[in-house]
Amino acid sequence: MASERDTEVIRAEIEQARTQLAASVDELATRLAPSRVVDQAKASVKEKLTSPVGMAVLGGVAVLVTFVAVRNLRRSRR
């Protein structure tokens, strides 16, 4: 009788571990869903670009692109 009860306890523990593992796998699948990862990346980039530092970087890139475009236009006219 004691070994039978031990077997039931072991089975219950295995079932509980299996349930916890299934919940963990489901949570990971939700966290790592491609659409969610893309949405998080977009939000992160948008947040960084709208910060003062991000806007300064964008302004610098715009000035650089304008400079290169004007230089290329002048060279092509020569």
Image: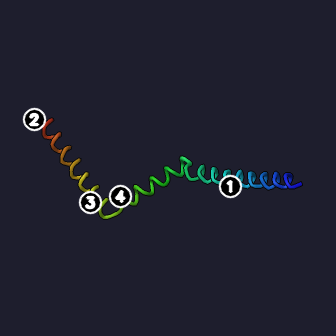
**Callout 1 secondary element:** helix
Q: Amino acid at mark 1?
A: Gln
If you read the primary sequence from the N terminus, does the residue marked by circle 2 or circle 1 appear first? Answer: 1
Which residue is label 1 attached to?
20
Quadrant of the image containing the N terminus: bottom right
The residue under the point 26% across, 56% down is 59
The residue under the point 79% across, 51% down is 11
The crowding category of the residue bearing disc 3, from other C-alpha atoms within 10 Å (few below 14, some 14 to 19, many at least 20), is few
Q: Amino acid at mark 4?
A: Leu
The residue under the point 42% across, 57% down is 44
Which residue is label 2 attached to?
78
State the residue in front, 50 or 24.
Answer: 24
Which residue is label 4 attached to?
49
Depicted 48 relative to depicted 78: above or below: below
**Callout 4 secondary element:** helix
Q: Residue furthest bottom?
A: 52
**Callout 2 secondary element:** loop
If you read the primary sequence from the N terminus, does the residue marked by circle 4 or circle 3 appear first? Answer: 4
Return the x and y of residue 64 as percentages of the image width and height: 21, 49
Which residue is label 3 attached to?
56
Q: Check whether the beta carbons of the residues at disc 2 and disc 1 lie within 8 A of each other.
A: no
- Which mark is in front, 4 or 2? 4
State the residue in front, 25 or 42.
Answer: 25
Q: Amino acid at mark 2?
A: Arg
- Which mark is in front, 2 or 1? 1
If you read the primary sequence from the N terminus, does the residue marked by circle 4 or circle 2 appear first? Answer: 4
Return the x and y of residue 21 as percentages of the image width and height: 66, 51
